[in-house]
């Protein structure tokens, strides 16, 4: 039987702790502390999977607690979700800068808390699965790129974008290219009303994605501690672990990110145009079929009218011949001929009464022709 996940609740308000305990107690093993120092003392010993951390506490804020936990080798991978009444962009950025993984705004409901905790546990499990392969994967990636300089890598990236016809593929290519430079990253592509996110660590950090989305249209780039976000209209690239103490390398990495982002922006626009063209080609094909069907209908109608006239003429001739052969007098033939002529006129009237409809059909055909040939 698998063990229950462990959650450490940190909040100086007992009432808030009781609410979270009531919501989560059935599915998780819980421990509650009421200040930051107790959290720092408890976490390395008890080793929770997730910490629900209040921000505004006396003595030590949640930001400082998170910073110390993420700075410790033993607790750096514990999922930390801030639970706070503070909800400005500055508050969320501050939480992200100290290493927070997610953010819940008070007051919250039970469903939201359960969902956020569930996502945190999934990410924790994924981190554990990746821990034993991450170092080896990074060494392999760096080794594979040893003989290729960074300029060559950028040229390879630009060339490789032409083989990407879907946005997920393009985002994955960026993540892999940044990894080959020795850095982790998260990429967000915004195109055709949808959003595509990729992360080099596998698990996508919800708070990270929210921060990227919030600032994607505010600054061309933003530095948040050792993280840099590069923003273009359709793509944002977040690079982590930037060499803040090495100005030369720091500048070079940012230049490479600009090249990657700009090439990606061009490729996204090309994919959008290609998709729009395919959609238009499909529509034009439908319009061509409609025009062809209307044209065939028009021709068939004219053919039927012509055949009807021929049949009526043949009927009149045949009837007259047979009446004469039967020695029927003109006195009796003429009324019969009049009946046939009347039937012919009534039949033609049916066709002639459709002239307005035929005119409208012809107008529609001309409009279709104009659209197709535009």
Image (cartoon, helix red, strand yellow):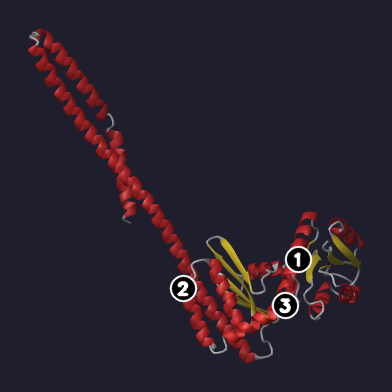
Q: Position of residue 48 (x, y in %)?
A: 84, 70
Contact, mark 2 vs mark 3 (Cβ under 8 Å): no
- Determine crowd level at label 1: few under 14, some 14-19, many 20+ residues with C-alpha closer than 10 A: many
Task: Examine the rendering and report whether any part of residue 362 can be seen.
Answer: no
- Residue bearing mark 2: 162
Mark 1 or mark 3: name the one nearer the start of the chain. Answer: 1
* Alpha-carbon span between mark 1 and mark 3: 20 Å
**Element at badge 2?**
loop
Pick the quarter of the image with the N terminus. bottom right
Q: Position of residue 312 (x, y in %)?
A: 18, 24
Pick the quarter of the image with the C terminus. bottom left
- Residue bearing mark 1: 120
Q: Is residue 9 left or right of residue 90?
A: right
What residue is drawn where x is 54% and y is 90%? 147
Q: Which mark is residue 132?
A: 3
**Element at badge 3?**
helix
Contact, mark 1 vs mark 2 (Cβ under 8 Å): no
């Amino acid at each position: 039987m698998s063990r229950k996940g462990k959650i450490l609740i940190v909040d100086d308000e007992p009432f808030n702790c009781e609410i979270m305990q009531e919501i989560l107690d059935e599915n998780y093993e819980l421990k509650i502390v009421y200040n930051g120092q107790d959290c720092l003392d408890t976490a390395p010993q008890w080793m929770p999977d997730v910490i629900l951390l209040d921000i505004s506490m006396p003595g030590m804020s949640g930001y400082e607690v998170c910073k110390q936990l993420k700075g410790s080798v033993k607790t750096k991978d514990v999922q930390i979700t801030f639970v706070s009444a503070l909800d400005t962009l500055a508050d969320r950025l501050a939480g992200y800068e100290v290493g927070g993984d997610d953010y819940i705004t008070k007051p919250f409901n039970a469903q939201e808390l359960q969902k956020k905790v569930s996502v945190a546990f999934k990410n924790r499990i994924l981190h554990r699965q990746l821990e034993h392969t991450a170092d080896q994967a990074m060494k392999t990636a760096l080794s594979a790129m040893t003989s290729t300089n960074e300029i060559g890598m950028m040229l390879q990236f630009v060339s490789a974008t032409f083989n990407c016809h879907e946005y997920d593929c393009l985002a994955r290519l960026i993540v892999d290219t940044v990894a080959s430079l020795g850095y982790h990253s998260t990429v967000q592509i915004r195109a055709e009303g949808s959003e595509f996110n990729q992360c080099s660590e596998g698990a996508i950090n919800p708070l990270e994605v929210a921060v990227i989305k919030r600032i994607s249209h505010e600054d061309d780039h933003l530095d948040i501690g050792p993280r840099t976000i590069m923003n273009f209209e359709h793509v944002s690239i977040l690079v982590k672990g930037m060499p803040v103490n090495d100005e030369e390398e720091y500048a070079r990495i940012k230049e490479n990110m600009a090249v990657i982002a700009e090439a990606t922006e061009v490729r996204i626009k090309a994919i959008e145009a290609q998709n729009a063209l395919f959609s238009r080609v499909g529509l034009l094909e439908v319009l061509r079929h409609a025009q062809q069907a209307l044209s065939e209908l028009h021709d068939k109608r004219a053919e039927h009218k012509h055949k009807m006239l021929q049949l009526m003429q043949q009927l009149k001739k045949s009837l007259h011949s047979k009446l004469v052969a039967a020695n029927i007098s003109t006195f009796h033939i003429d009324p019969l001929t009049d009946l046939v002529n009347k039937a012919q006129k009534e039949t033609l009237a049916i066709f002639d009464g459709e002239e307005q409809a035929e005119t409208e059909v012809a107008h529609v055909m001309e409009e279709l022709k104009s659209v197709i040939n535009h």
